[in-house]
Amino acid sequence: MDIQNNLITLADGNQMPQEGFGLYKVRGQAAVDTAVKAAYENGYRLFDTAQLYENEQEVGNAFKKFAIPRENIFVTTKVTEARQGYDEAIASVKESLQKLQMDYVDLLLIHWPVRQHFFETWRAFEDLKKAGLTKSIGVSNYQTIHLEYLATKANEMPVVDQVEMHPFLTLKPVIEFNKQHNIVTQAWSPLGRGTVLDQEVLKEIADKYQKSPAQVVLRWHLQNGVAFIPKSVHEERIAQNADIYDFELSDEEMKQVDKLNKFARTGREPELTYEYGRMY
């Protein structure tokens, strides 16, 4: 198994790479070109962007520049809070596709739950899927209560729930809930924006396998069965983050990483975004 052939089958039958490449805060055409080229050459096939990241145009340009075949990649984008609501969500996705220079995305996510447009945005997503503008639909930053609420009116449920997750925020109940409902949990900020990497236990495990603490954390995600999207603009780290398929953590080592949990977020509490209708 390696990064290219490690695929997860979603509840709708589509397949998604378990490990992908995050494009948060990768700005400017030169930076996007470098990151996309390095990621693709190192075997990444899932590329995760969003309207909020303001780089969809650059990402689309990079795919064209390097003549990356559309069928070779899995592309995710997300609808931001300001573009939610039925008509607005549909219009915004069409704009995103124009910027990405694509006829469809593989996965479309609601970026944050927003109370004011909660059900109508999801209805728009269901219709966008029917229209072929996305192959799969999901959510981001939804906690179990948001998913339970969505289930009261949804015709189909999300196949992916992308949430902040790392050793300081393990979210075991969310993983279990999603598993029971055939929803793939996908970790954003899988390295806790670097905050977890100086933990002594990670360094000890890394030394044992001649890997880096970051590789240990990503291997922990892999063995937890969640999808994950590490992000870097450094070619060496991009390659390193993909090189996690030649070692395996023991059950005891998995538990040691689990014990680092302290319910600490690097991002916002989703319920606040749900109530106030905006991330910032």
Image (spheres, rainbow, N blue to C red):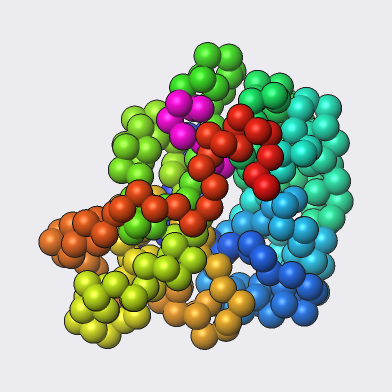
- Asked if 67 appears above or below 10 in the picture, the reply is below
- Residue 211 position, x and y percent, is 31, 81
Toward which corner of the image does residue 252 lie, by quadrant?
bottom left
Q: Say which quadrant the N terminus sits in.
A: bottom left
Task: Identify the residue at horizontal 53%, vertical 52% (top origin).
Answer: 267
Q: Residue furthest left?
A: 252
Left or right of 221 on screen, residue 239: right
- Residue 25 position, x and y percent, is 67, 65
Counting every numbered tag in the picture gives: 0
Task: Identify the residue at horizontal 78%, vertical 73% (top origin).
Answer: 28
- Asked if 93 appears above or below 215 in the picture, the reply is above
- Residue 160 position, x and y percent, is 51, 40
Toward which corner of the image does residue 154 lie, by quadrant?
top right
Queried whether the magenta region covers residue 149, the answer comes back as: no
Task: Identify the residue at horizontal 32%, vertical 37% (top origin).
Answer: 173
Magenta stretch in the rendered image:
137-147
Task: Identify the residue at horizontal 75%, vertical 33% (top origin).
Answer: 84
**Can residue 66 be seen?**
no
- Asked if 26 appears above or below 156 in the picture, the reply is below
Left or right of 94 on screen, residue 231: left
Question: Which one is in front, 269 or 94?
Answer: 269
**Can residue 267 be seen?**
yes
